[in-house]
Image (cartoon, rainbow, N blue to C red):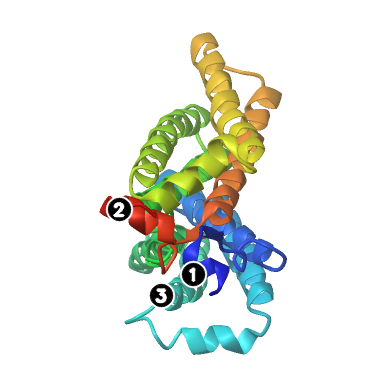
Amino acid sequence: MHEWMVSYTRQREWIDRRGLFLWLAFYTGGLGGGLYLVSLYFNNLWGMFIGWLIVSIIKGGAHLIFLGHPLRAWRMVTRPHSSWISRGISFVLLFGLFGAIQMAFTYWSPGSAGEVIFKVLAGIMAFGVAIYTGFVLNSIKGVPFWNSSMLPILFILCGILGGFGLSVVIALNGGGIDLHAAETGSRWLLLANAVVIGIYLWTAAHRDETGRRSVAQQLHGEMAGMFWIGIVALGIVIPAVIALVSLASGSAASGLLLTGVACEIAGGLALRYCVLKAGAYKPLVARPHAAAQASGRPA
């Protein structure tokens, strides 16, 4: 009998070797979509353009490399009624189209009806780009660690946190965004992310044995370094300390703020990596001793 049918077996296709491009695509989709949404809030064309580039070039390119053949993407678009991957590709393509039209209106005809309409359409697609990867993983019932309703929430919050972080960078470089407002948004999203990460791990650990082992791999297993250094230290603690320093002093040096943004982005990458790396298939057949323990009979 194949080992994966009776034991905890980590999935590899979506994170090892060429799967690293999917990891990059998953993160940059959230980051670019989040930045676009934040930039709509600030009505900042530079932020919209950078978010659009991140999604269209980095995410789109990484996805095509992962697929290995561009024609596969076109075939996937034809099944939006049954596949979150198909819906996601549609979100990316429509965001690229609507976002380009919207930015043209914003540049040449600000305040027009066309600008308003395409801001709404592009904003909806940006939200879809940022959140759909959570639904892609959530729909895979054979991997308990992914099959959680918290995952889409976690991914969209992480994307918007990265968006606020990049808006701080734009503000520091005279891009027309209010620095105080960008910092405030970043602080609140950082807190929300920390809370949702904790809830997600707790619920995964209490769902079943496979989910518990996925969490254990991160807390004190082979992924502990990535989790504690990448997610906790870089993604939460250091940005939180910098945010508190800025809040207490009323302002912080630009170098310190940029360090905080870099740590947030590193934390977002580490989060996606750990989620993909820790995903393991639930055994199809229980081992004899496990079945005996469940029934109360000796193995």
Q: Which residue is mark 3?
A: 87
At 54% from the left and 52% from the top, the residue drawn is 278
Say which of 246 and 150 sits in front. 150
x then y, percent, for residue 257:
63, 27
Q: Are marks 3 and 2 in contact (CB under 8 Å)?
A: no
x then y, percent, for residue 36:
49, 54
Q: Which residue is mark 2?
A: 297
| CA–CA distance in space, label 2 to label 1 | 22 Å
Number of numbered callouts drawn: 3
Q: What crowding class fits label 1: few (fewer than 14 Cα within 10 Å), some (14-19), or many (20 or more)?
A: some
Residue lying farthest to the left in this orientation: 295
At 44% from the left and 33% from the top, the residue drawn is 194
Circle 3 SS class: helix
Q: Are marks 1 and 3 in contact (CB under 8 Å)?
A: no
At 63% from the left and 78% from the top, the residue drawn is 67
Which mark sits nearer the N-terminus, 1 or 3? 1
Number of the front mark, 1 or 3: 1
Q: Amino acid at mark 3?
A: Arg
Q: Amino acid at mark 2?
A: Arg
Residue 5 is labelled as: 1
x then y, percent, for residue 203:
34, 43
Q: Amino acid at mark 1?
A: Met
Which mark sits nearer the N-terminus, 2 or 1? 1
Say which of 116 and 17 sits in front. 17
Circle 1 SS class: helix
Quadrant of the image containing the C terminus: bottom left
- In the rendered structure, the answer to whether residue 229 lies left or right of residue 73 reads right
